[in-house]
Image (cartoon, rainbow, N blue to C red):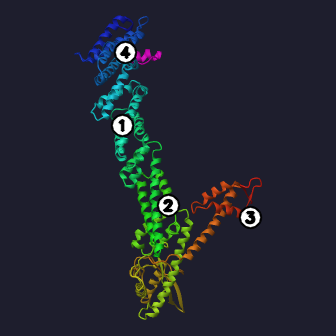
């Protein structure tokens, strides 16, 4: 039979056939004994719809079938689904809802297949909602809108039960909440408005009640343990049944109620708050405090403020302790040079080590705590002790450390490590130029002592006829740490030089047995008489070159390999004039600058500062041309702050001096306004 001869199917007849298929589907969903759809069943139902939609008008029943598709869902929901849900409550209702939603999606999937021809042509041409959307909308309008409030309350009740330690069916909650998401058909409005908003409100109320009790009953560490555990569990809830988009909102609510609301009370608890944790070195609790308070807005501000107060107080206590000891020392007239000041600097270094470790480990290297540490140390590091400025104390400390490792007899590695720590402290000192001036005098003193040492060596040789180096010998003894490090290769010294080294070592051991001499051959020079035809020439060569040349006193010809055999571990460099002297470096007792030298250092620094202020003012005014007094002073302070903290009065005095020298002039109408004179 051709298409033109196909028998027309009227609406009632065709729908009666479709109704049988739909009834069979309902029976399957209700669990009644019913065979599954065969491919033949499916094709017959699909073909019936196809035929009823492709008949010529007035027998094209596309619109009627589209309406009956929707009515099929409405009838099933009204007669079967809603009654089954209305008779159940709480968790039983939730289980029934999950089952009905799952069945409904199966029904939508099968009916959409039966009526598929509508989707392909009729719906597309008329811009109507697709069959799948119509099916879900029926459930939303008839079931979800009636029950979502009860469902929401039942879910929140189960969540609160779980918070109280009860076991709940998390998979059930996951399935229920998926309905809130899926019913939105791509939008999160239903989940957010119908569930999440109420859940967040309940969460805030729940933790508000808990926090109000905990803050009264618990110590700060115990409270923080509970808070951290609560946050962990809420995050766990998200991973098991809440939508991932709820995580940040949920944690924010918990953090607000547990931490933000009670931040001040918690941090300032008398016997267990932040001060107490710092006092008692509770590093684990401090780390937890950082983790918790870093999550709330401005949460770290009060923690870093307390940290700054605590470090400042400890440092100030060290200053007072050193001041008291210095006063007692003067009263007893036991003026042991710098001993108490050395102890003070060592304690400040230890304090910095301790709290820098806190910043790096407990406070995760956060800039806020680096700033707090810096500001705290700037407070007490710029206080003087026993009449000495902090810059002088640090310079004196370095000087002492470089003498045989200080009182602790430190190794070279420990000395280097200690000096690195002093450099960190120097960052907090406002008078860095004063430190530099004091310390530079040490190098000068070192050279002076080296010259005295050579004179003593010559006297020693004159008084000990048996101590004869055989050649003229000048040794410059310098202190390790005051000078740059130099590379020096191993060298098998010629016999003549070995004798020199032995004689000098014997002399030096008469002075001290506790210091190590290290010979730096790379800085040595030798004057050698070379007997050449027709005359003798004096050669000025390095120690290495001299060692090679002396081999030719016993041989006329030597190969490169033979020279290397005698002199190991170095490279042959060309002969050239050198002006450096043989030096060796070791640690040596250096006296502190005398009082009159200290006064001279301060005077020199003061003079340098005047020049620096003048240069800064001229530099600023040359750039700005016209500037007010206050702004000029502030810019000057900012420029010079890296080396020293200029006094406002000193700047004002330098401005006046520059005016008299015609670098600047005052405005006639405004005396606080200056102009640069080119």
Q: Which residue ends up furthest to the bottom in the rendered image? A: 465
The circle on residue 115 is 4
Q: Position of residue 184 (x, y in %)?
A: 41, 24
**What's the distance in space between the residues labelled 4 and 3, CA to CA?**
102 Å
Callout in the foreground (1, 4):
1
Looking at the image, is 9 positioned above or below residue 350?
above
Q: Is residue 639 visible?
A: yes
The circle on residue 660 is 3
Instruction: Find out whether residue 119 is within the magenta segment.
Output: yes
Secondary structure under the numbered disc 4 in the rendered image: loop
- Sooner in the amino-acid sequence: mark 2 or mark 3: 2
Q: Quadrant of the C terminus?
A: bottom right
Secondary structure under the numbered disc 2 in the rendered image: helix
Looking at the image, is 128 positioned above or below residue 339?
above
Give the labeled residue for mark 2: 380
- Sooner in the amino-acid sequence: mark 1 or mark 3: 1
Q: Position of residue 226 (x, y in %)?
A: 34, 42
The circle on residue 210 is 1
Secondary structure under the numbered disc 3 in the rendered image: helix
Quadrant of residue 238 within the rendered picture: top left
Callout in the foreground (2, 3):
2
Q: Position of residue 194 (x, y in %)?
A: 41, 25
**What's the distance in space between the residues labelled 1 and 4, CA to CA?**
56 Å
Q: Residue at x 51, y 61 (%)?
A: 428
């Amino acid at each position: 039979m051709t298409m033109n001869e196909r028998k027309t199917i009227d609406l009632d007849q065709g729908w009666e056939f479709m109704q049988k298929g739909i009834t069979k589907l309902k029976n399957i969903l209700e669990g009644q004994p019913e065979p599954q759809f065969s491919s033949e069943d499916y094709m017959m139902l699909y073909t019936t719809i196809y035929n009823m939609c492709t008949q010529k008008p007035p027998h094209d029943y596309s619109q009627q079938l589209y309406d009956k598709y929707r009515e099929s869902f409405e009838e099933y929901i009204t007669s079967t689904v809603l009654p089954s849900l209305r008779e159940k409550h709480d968790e039983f209702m939730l289980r029934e809802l999950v089952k009905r939603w799952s069945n409904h999606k199966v029904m939508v999937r099968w009916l959409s297949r039966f009526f598929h021809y509508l989707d392909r042509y009729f719906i597309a041409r008329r811009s109507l909602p697709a069959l799948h959307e119509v099916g879900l909308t029926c459930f939303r309008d008839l079931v979800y809108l009636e029950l979502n409030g009860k469902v929401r309350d039942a879910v929140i009740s189960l969540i609160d039960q779980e918070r109280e330690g009860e076991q709940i069916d998390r998979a059930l909650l996951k399935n229920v909440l998926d309905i809130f998401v899926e019913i939105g058909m791509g939008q999160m409005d239903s989940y957010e408005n119908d569930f999440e908003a109420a859940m967040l409100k309940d969460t805030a109320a729940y933790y508000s009640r808990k926090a109000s009790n905990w803050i009264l009953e618990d110590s700060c560490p115990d409270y923080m343990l509970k808070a951290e555990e609560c946050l962990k569990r809420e995050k766990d809830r998200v991973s098991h049944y809440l939508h991932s988009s709820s995580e940040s909102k949920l944690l924010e609510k918990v953090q607000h109620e547990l931490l933000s609301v009670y931040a001040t009370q918690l941090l300032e608890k008398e016997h267990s708050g932040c001060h107490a944790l710092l006092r008692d070195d509770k590093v684990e609790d401090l780390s937890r405090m950082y983790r918790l308070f870093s999550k709330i807005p401005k949460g770290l501000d009060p923690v870093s403020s307390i940290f700054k107060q605590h470090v400042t107080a400890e440092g100030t206590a060290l200053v007072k302790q050193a001041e008291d000891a210095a006063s007692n020392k003067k009263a007893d007239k036991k003026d042991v040079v710098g001993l108490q000041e050395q102890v003070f600097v060592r304690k400040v270094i230890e304090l910095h080590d301790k709290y820098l470790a806190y910043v790096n480990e407990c406070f995760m290297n956060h800039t806020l705590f680096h700033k707090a540490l810096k500001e705290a140390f700037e407070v007490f590091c710029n206080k003087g002790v026993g009449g000495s400025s902090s810059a002088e104390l640090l310079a004196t400390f370095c000087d002492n450390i470089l003498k045989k490792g200080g009182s602790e007899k430190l190794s070279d590695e420990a000395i280097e490590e200690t000096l690195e720590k002093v450099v960190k402290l120097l960052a907090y000192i406002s008078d860095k130029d004063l430190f530099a001036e004091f310390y530079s005098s040490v190098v000068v003193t070192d050279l002076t002592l080296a010259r005295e040492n050579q004179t003593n060596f010559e006297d020693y040789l004159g008084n000990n006829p048996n101590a004869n180096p055989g050649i003229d010998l000048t040794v410059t003894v310098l202190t390790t740490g005051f000078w740059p490090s130099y590379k020096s290769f191993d060298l098998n010294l010629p016999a003549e030089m070995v004798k020199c080294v032995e004689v000098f070592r014997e002399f030096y051991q008469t002075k001290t047995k506790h210091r190590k001499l290290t010979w730096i051959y790379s800085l040595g020079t030798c004057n050698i008489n070379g007997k050449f035809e027709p005359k003798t020439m004096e050669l000025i060569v390095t120690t290495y070159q001299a060692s090679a040349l002396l081999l030719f006193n016993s041989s006329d010809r030597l190969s490169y390999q033979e020279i290397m055999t005698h002199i190991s571990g170095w490279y042959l460099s060309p002969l050239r004039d050198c002006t450096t002297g043989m030096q060796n470096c070791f640690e040596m007792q250096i006296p502190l600058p005398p009082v009159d030298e200290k006064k001279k250092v301060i005077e020199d620094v003061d003079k340098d500062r005047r020049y620096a202020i003048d240069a800064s003012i001229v530099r600023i005014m040359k750039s700005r041309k016209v500037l007010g007094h206050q702004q000029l002073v502030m810019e000057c302070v900012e420029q010079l702050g890296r080396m020293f903290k200029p006094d406002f009065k000193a700047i004002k005095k330098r401005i006046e001096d520059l005016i008299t020298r015609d670098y600047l002039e005052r405005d006639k109408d405004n005396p606080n306004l200056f102009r640069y004179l080119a």
